[in-house]
Amino acid sequence: MAMAYIEPAPIKDKENPLESMMSRFDAAARLLGISDEMYDILKVPARQVIVGLPVTMDNGAIKVFEGYRVIHSNILGPAKGGIRLDPGVNLDEVRALAAWMTWKCAVVDIPYGGAKGGIACNPREMSAGEIERLIRQYTVAMLDVIGPDRDIPAPDMGTGPREMAWIVDEYSKAKGMTVNNVVTGKPLVLGGSLGRTEATGRGVTVAALSAMDKLRMNPYRATAAVQGFGNVGSFAAELLHERGVTVVAISDISGGYYNASGIDITAAVTYRNGNKGTLEGFSGAEKISNEELLSLAVDVLVPAAKEDVITDDNAASIQARMIVEGANGPTSASADEIINSKGILVVPDILANAGGVTVSYFEWVQNRIGYKWTLDRINRRADRVMKDAFDRVFETSQRYQVPLRLAAYIVAIDKVSSTYKFRGGY
Ligand code: NAD
């Protein structure tokens, strides 16, 4: 099964995505005591671009799509963020996602600002040719926005290596030379990086092991349950197992699978790959529900499927000692308080699933130096980035006496605002 890497993005709060993101930002900014001026600087995107994209459809008719690119911040370096194709894409959402990328890159200390792009369209109803013309049109419209030293797109919902290759081609034509580091998430032959597909699951594992170390948990005596068996969940389960953790439960859309003495993860991956991508009918375990999986008495719970699975309806029943958020926004804001009051350690999404964007950064670095690193080197460096980020956030949470989620925002906002202070403005 081909599993594309997509750059992390937060959940869509259908009411007002920008406000929901800003509420966490606000809490951290208050704790840090940043000035009103700095607050405004960090809040307002640096650049917001809306373009009309006329595309000839297969039936000969011209249809005009609306495309967006928002650079939230480029204080730390070129902006970074995916491009999504979805009928619901709008400026407000893209703005929220762009700001979120700023904080995410800052937490793991990679020298990028945050950006996001999108085109309001339904790729499921378009032919490959129509999507290609749309992507090429978008690239041309954004020629003065994107660039290896300005703003580096990547895959997001509805885009993958194929679309990134088209962007490289169109951008390169305009520049009269091959510029492959204008995007990340490219096919390997075009300058993509080894290790990128498994990078997020791998980072989740490093975050989990770092947290276990703080709680003085021995991985060889620990148990884990992983919800979701796609890109993030299956690699996380595999690597946790490799590091000695007994993964007693896994799940996907077909339900949960439990085995007290440990699931054979390699067998589960092989089964899924030969079974149209689902675990349906997997026999190495007892069938449970996704809801039951969440309330198992395990040491580590890894929600790696979708947003809002731990809510105030089920938070009280969670028995795990720690939650490592592989998915984006798996814990609702109201559940946060219940989970915290139970003393469960939560490694937040913004930190736990940042392994993917870290290896995207490595892709760009390799393109810039014109050299390919070995998988071993990539993994070692990515692990180091994740471990350092975890330690920084953990130390901040102790200093401010706040949960890791708030601490992650504090680390990010502090980094961007102090960089701004050094650089100065008008
Ligand atoms: P994926 O599509 O590869 O896998 C999703 C998995 O979740 C599948 O096994 C699916 O069957 C399962 N699932 C879907 N709905 C479910 C449900 N209701 N209950 C239980 N399982 C369900 O997706 P992915 O790339 O692994 O992403 C998973 C989460 O991680 C998403 O929230 C995504 O935003 C986030 N994330 C992904 C990456 C990445 O690099 N892929 C990076 C950062 C964050």
Image (spheres, helix red, strand yellow):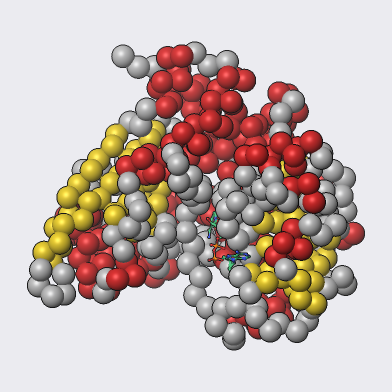
**Residue most extreme to the right:** 221
**Is residue 386 shown to the viewer in this render?**
no
Q: Which residue is more in the foreground, 408 or 293?
A: 293
Residue 382 lies, with reference to residue 244, above or below; the image says above
Residue 256 lies, with reference to residue 305, above or below; the image says below
Q: Where is residue 229 in the image (x, y as percent from the top left)?
A: 63, 68
Q: Which residue is more in the foreground, 372 or 76?
A: 76
Residue 151 lies, with reference to residue 42, above or below; the image says below
Quarter residue 261 falls in: bottom right
Quarter residue 65 falls in: bottom left
Ligand 1 found in image quarter: bottom right
Q: Residue at x 59, y 81 (%)?
A: 273
**Is residue 312 shown to the viewer in this render?**
yes
Q: How many marks?
A: 0
Q: Where is residue 28 in the image (x, y as percent from the top left)?
A: 59, 26
Q: Which residue is more in the foreground, 31 or 205?
A: 31
Q: Which residue is drawn at 67% across and 51% down?
A: 310
Left-right relation of 227 to 273: right
Left-right relation of 103 to 312: left
Left-right relation of 363 to 316: left
Quarter residue 270 falls in: bottom right
**Residue most extreme to the front:** 313
Q: Where is residue 14 in the image (x, y as percent from the top left)?
A: 45, 46
Q: Residue at x 63, y 59 (%)?
A: 304
Q: Quadrant of the C terminus?
A: top left
Q: Where is residue 187 in the image (x, y as percent from the top left)?
A: 40, 68
Q: Which residue is drawn at 35% across and 32% down?
A: 45
Q: Which residue is more in the foreground, 317 or 143?
A: 317
Residue 348 lies, with reference to residue 269, above or below; the image says above
